Amino acid sequence: MALTPHDVELGGLVTRYYEGGDPTAPSVLLVHDGSYGSDALLSFGAVAELLADEFHVVLPDLLGWGGSAKSHRFDESLYAPRIRQLAQLASHLGITEVHAVGNSFGGSLLLHAAIEKALPLASVTSIAGTGGPWRSETGLTAMADYRTTEADARRISNLVVTDDVASAEHVEHRYRNSTIPGHWESIRAWGLKNPDAPAAAPGGSYPESLGTVSVPVLLVEGDSDVMVDAGWTGKAAEAAPSVRTRGIDTGHSPNIDRPDVVADLVREVVHQTRP
């Protein structure tokens, strides 16, 4: 089933989102990762097409990516403006309950939105999104020096798929996205810090705060994921016993190279959650 693109102004900034399925069916929000050149379709397009016959699927480009505004807030966390973006999009679409699924940064974003009770959530599934901690050395350094070249698009793409060989189409899509004016600057701004500013105080009580979330939370770990520390889901569950964990035989982004596995996982979560 085809996904329809839309552009809408939310909070003064344009959001590009894709929509499919029956709007009266249960809504599933699919949130992409934070790598250079990513976007909604690259990350979750194949999953959405598998789900659209049963669910109302919504795939936004987060601020800084794809067709959405290229923007960075230096006075807020990376999550805050994008949580607002998702909340405003849900309101715009009249969504009163949504099953949210995110990969990597997208998963972490949704975990913090659940803690803040900022979205009308029915459930949260985070695939390789730790919420902040437990990123591996590879994960921390992989995006540090992205150059806008096809070779670097290939390097990033190969890190997130299971067999370490991303398709040529995927690499071309990532490279093309990374050349969109303002995209590189929006993402690189994350690491820009005033060297003379005092060190920030440790933030919050994460991951213990996951225990305050009232909707079902599932943390999904890929057995061959090199971007996060092995066993991170177990560490989160020790701090927040109410969350469920799942290990699957994939890499960092099974939504890209194992969309059938992720679609089945989403169906399972939705059907278990619904009365």
Image (cartoon, rainbow, N blue to C red):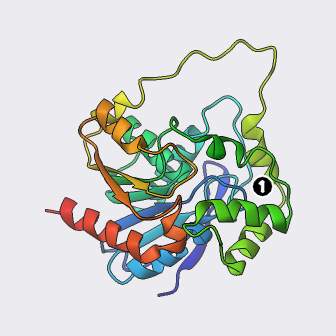
User: Residue drawn at (61%, 39%), measured in percent from left and top?
Assistant: 78
Q: Residue furthest left?
A: 275
Across and down, in percent, residue 200 comes to 63, 17
Q: Is residue 206 above or below residue 156?
A: above
Frontmost residue, 57 versus 178:
178
Horizontal relation, residue 135 to residue 247: left or right: right
Say few, some or many: other residues with alpha carbon within 10 Å of mark 1 (under 14 / 14 to 19 / 20 or more): many
User: Residue drawn at (52%, 66%), measured in percent from left and top?
Assistant: 59
For the question of whether residue 179 can be seen, the reply is: no
Residue denoted by label 1 = 183
Q: Which quadrant does the C terminus fall into?
A: bottom left
For the question of whether residue 214 can be seen, the reply is: yes
Across and down, in percent, residue 38 comes to 66, 62
Across and down, in percent, residue 40 comes to 58, 66
User: Residue drawn at (41%, 64%), measured in percent from left and top?
Assistant: 249
**Picture quadrant of residue 190:** top right
Frontmost residue, 118 versus 250:
250
Q: Residue furthest bottom?
A: 1
Badge 1 marks a residue whose secondary structure is: helix
Horizontal relation, residue 98 to residue 11: left or right: left
Count of all numbered marks drawn on residues in the image: 1
Across and down, in percent, residue 10 comes to 59, 53
**Picture quadrant of residue 157:** bottom right
Horizontal relation, residue 258 to residue 182: left or right: left
Amino acid type at image mark 1: His
User: Residue drawn at (39%, 57%), measured in percent from left and top?
Assistant: 100
